[in-house]
Image (spheres, rainbow, N blue to C red):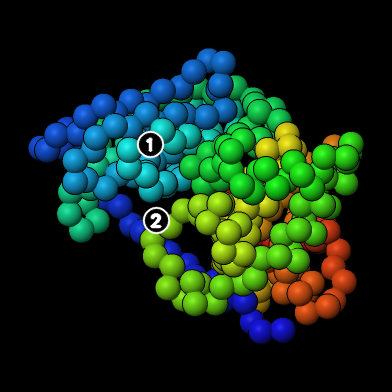
């Protein structure tokens, strides 16, 4: 089997407080009591500026590229405590200014609330082609494990690894699950976002995890974890697609000891 290529994109951000000198309108960060697991950014016109959203807690930072002219959602997945959420506007180079910020005190959140949402990195709706396919695949299956198996089998048998994309992907890339579904190709980030979108749409708590794995020689990688039968289990559709499409049998769940998480979504 060919070695699976994974690109690592690192962006350093110099943060400057204060309001930018140019106009940014119709921006609103919101955290609702009835949806404590996410922050919503309602975004209208943003001028020519690129935007980042920073989610920070206890010295740990998640950094998100913000899509223009659409509503996007971001998870608060680092456990209970006080979060700082900051919307940043690009100035030049790696310099950014703060546009808006929120302090949010979060209590413990259940898995089925946190990991079944559509978020910026795992963006889906009931009209998404991949979500419609997930419903078709599992229409007559009553148990979560059977539904997970059906989605896993579909992804590993139908999505091919895109080596060219892996070598050219740029900072700020966010998977579009319908584009991945239509093209039937992707990188590890795409596999994990597609799988998570399909299982989350069925109400199955699913994480997308980025980190390092022995399965790819210790390189940076993306995979999933699903919550079933009271425990989290590792699923790696990227690796298993290569084996499955080469005619080998694969196991649904992987050894967690071979995977080291850096970021969880």
Q: Check disc 2: other Cα within 10 Å, few if <14, some if 14-19, many if 20+.
A: some
Q: Position of residue 120 (x, y in %)?
A: 48, 42
Q: Image check: 254 left or right of 22?
A: right
Query: Real-space Cα distance between discs 1 and 2?
Result: 16 Å
Q: Secondary structure at mark 2?
A: loop
Q: Quadrant of the C terminus?
A: top right
Q: Secondary structure at mark 1?
A: loop
Q: Position of residue 257 (x, y in %)?
A: 77, 61
Residue topped by disc 1: 70
Residue found at the far bottom of this picture: 2
Number of numbered labels in the structure image: 2
Name the mark nearer the viewer: 1 or 2. Answer: 1
Foreground of the two, 109 or 29: 29
Foreground of the two, 219 or 118: 118
Q: Position of residue 88 (x, y in %)?
A: 28, 40
Q: Position of residue 127 (x, y in %)?
A: 59, 38
Residue topped by disc 2: 172
> Mark 1 touching mark 2, by CB under 8 A?
no
**Identity of the residue drawn at 21% across and 29% down:** 25
Q: Relative to residue 260, is residue 131 depicted above or below?
A: above
Q: Check disc 1: other Cα within 10 Å, few if <14, some if 14-19, many if 20+.
A: few
């Amino acid at each position: 089997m060919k070695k699976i290529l994974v690109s690592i994109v690192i962006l350093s951000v110099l943060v400057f407080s204060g309001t930018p000198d140019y106009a940014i309108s119709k921006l609103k960060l919101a955290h609702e009591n009835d949806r404590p697991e996410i922050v919503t950014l309602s975004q209208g016109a943003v001028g020519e500026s690129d935007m980042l959203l920073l989610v920070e807690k206890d010295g740990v930072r998640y950094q998100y590229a913000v899509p223009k002219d659409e509503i996007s959602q971001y998870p608060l997945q680092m456990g209970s405590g006080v979060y700082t959420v900051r919307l940043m506007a690009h100035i030049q180079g790696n310099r950014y200014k703060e546009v808006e910020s929120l302090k949010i005190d979060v209590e413990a959140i259940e898995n089925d609330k946190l990991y079944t949402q559509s978020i910026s990195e795992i963006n889906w709706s009931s009209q998404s082609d991949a979500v419609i396919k997930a419903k078709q695949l599992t229409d007559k299956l009553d148990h979560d494990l059977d539904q997970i198996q059906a989605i896993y089998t579909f992804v590993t048998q139908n999505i091919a690894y895109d080596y060219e994309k892996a070598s050219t992907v740029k900072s700020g890339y966010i998977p579009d699950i319908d584009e991945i579904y239509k093209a039937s190709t992707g990188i590890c980030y795409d596999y994990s976002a597609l799988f998570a979108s399909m299982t989350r749409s069925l109400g199955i708590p699913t994480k997308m995890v980025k980190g390092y794995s022995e399965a790819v020689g210790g390189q940076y990688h993306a995979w999933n974890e699903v919550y079933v039968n009271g425990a989290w289990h590792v699923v790696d559709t990227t690796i298993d697609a290569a084996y499955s499409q080469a005619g080998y049998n694969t196991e649904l769940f992987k050894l967690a000891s071979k995977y080291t998480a850096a970021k969880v979504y």
